Image (spheres, rainbow, N blue to C red):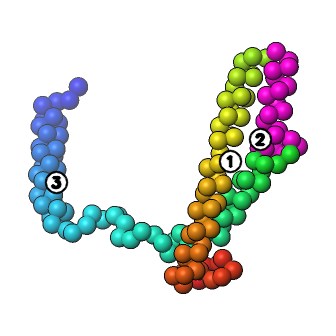
Amino acid sequence: MLSYRKAGATLGALALGGTLLAAAAPAQAASSAPSGAPTGDGAKGICKRLPKTEQRVQKSLDRLNGPATENGSVARLQQRVDNAKNAGQTAIYTYLNDRLTYRKSLLPTLTTRQSDLQAVATWCSSQGLATPSGTAR
């Protein structure tokens, strides 16, 4: 249990801290932009990371479109769903089928992202932010 002396000291410290924070608030409000706020659109960074981003998207598409022998492919998961259904394991079938639905939904998303990245690569080249080979300057 706190003694009255300790409780009074704690309340005094809290009041002093609140006063200091209130005095600092107008100084912060006077600045033009909050610290840590972005000042641009990040185009240079996007162009710089473009080759690795393109590789990552292509690698994901290759894996998803891979054969049933490849981990992470739609075909492999489809085979697992079929196996669970044939074995009568309804809970496993439902779980895997939901995963399969999600994994199939990734294909159009990644394909769209890949075409968007091609447009970004063209823009970066036209702005002089990337070399024709796709590596950033």
Amino acid under label 2? Val
Please name the predominant secondary structure of the magenta segment in the image: helix
Q: Are marks 3 and 2 in contact (CB under 8 Å)?
A: no
Mark number, residue 21: 3
Name the one closer to the observer, 53 or 18. Answer: 53
Q: Determine the CA span between mark 3 and mark 1.
A: 51 Å
- Please determine whether, in this image, residue 63 is positioned above or below residue 26: above
Q: What segment carries the magenta color?
A: 68-88
Find out whether residue 72 is within the magenta segment: yes
Name the quadrant containing residue 112: bottom right
Name the quadrant containing residue 96: top right
- Circle 2 packing at 10 Å, graded few (<14), some (14-19), many (20+), is many
The mark that comes first in sequence, 3 or 1, is 3
- Please determine whether, in this image, residue 42 is positioned above or below residue 128: above
- In percent of width and height, residue 16 lies at 12, 50
Give the left or right position of residue 28, taking residue 81 as reference: left
Q: Determine the CA span between mark 2 and mark 1.
A: 9 Å
The residue that mark 2 highlights is: 74
- In percent of width and height, residue 59 lies at 74, 57
Find out whether residue 44 is within the magenta segment: no
- Circle 3 packing at 10 Å, graded few (<14), some (14-19), many (20+), is few
The mark that comes first in sequence, 2 or 1, is 2
- Please determine whether, in this image, residue 54 is positioned above or below residue 62: below
Residue drawn at x 78%, y 36% as measured from the top left: 77
Judged by depth in the image, the label closer to the viewer, 3 or 1, is 1
Residue drawn at x 15%, y 58% as measured from the top left: 25
Give the left or right position of residue 32, taking residue 124 as reference: left
- In percent of width and height, residue 111 lies at 66, 54
Name the one closer to the observer, 103 or 38. Answer: 103
The residue that mark 1 highlights is: 107
